[in-house]
């Protein structure tokens, strides 16, 4: 999985778990909303500065954005 | 700890554990050596593209670069 995709998937998962919109996240992190949207669509290579801001707003460790998705075993 | 410092500390730790020089890492990752040096001196905000290349060459998960340093308890 491309690292942009891994990051995007985790960012969306964490943001949803906090029940905040892209708009709110962008505002609280002091980032352009369109940029947050590009990050979540895995179309940009986000840097450490933004990663740090996103982690702070979402109150997670930056490593959380790099967790491998847990493979769901097929239900029999 | 600033995220650049956390990343730098972990990158240097992993690189040393693999016993490779900044020069070798830069060459294998296809990155400018001076840039690797700036990343290890925490003077630049590295992006996902480079993070992915460094992780691939060092054969670690990108999350490894974001691990919090283990606090060493003082020996009594």
Image: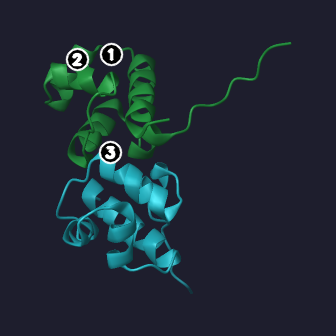
Chain colours: A cyan, B green
Badge 2 density bin: few <14, some 14–19, many ≥20, Cα 10 Å = some
Instruction: Give the number of the mark in front: 1 or 3.
Output: 3
**Image point 26% across, 17% down: which residue?**
B22
Q: In terms of secondary structure, where does tag 2 sit? A: helix
The subunit carrying tag 2 is B
Q: Which residue is mark 1?
A: B20
Image position, residue A45 (x, y; %): 21, 53
- Position above or below: A71 against B34: below
Q: Nearer the viewer, mark 3 or mark 2?
A: 3
Residue displayed at 29% across by 59% down: A1
- Res. A12 mark: none
Q: Which residue is mark 3?
A: A48
Relative to residue B8, is residue B47 drawn left or right?
left
Q: Looking at the image, can residue A2 be seen?
A: no
Instruction: Check disc 2 and report the residue beneath it.
Output: B24
Is residue A18 visible in this depiction of the protein? yes
How far separated are the C-alphas under marks 3 and 2? 23 Å
Q: Chain of mark 1?
A: B
């Amino acid at each position: 999985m491309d690292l942009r995709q891994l990051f995007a998937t985790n960012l969306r998962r964490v943001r949803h778990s906090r029940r905040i919109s892209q708009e709110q996240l962008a505002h609280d992190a002091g980032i352009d909303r369109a940029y947050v949207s590009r990050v979540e669509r895995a179309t940009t290579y986000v840097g450490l500065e933004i990663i740090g801001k996103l982690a702070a707003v979402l109150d997670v460790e930056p490593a959380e954005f790099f967790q491998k998705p847990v493979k769901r075993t097929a239900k029999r």
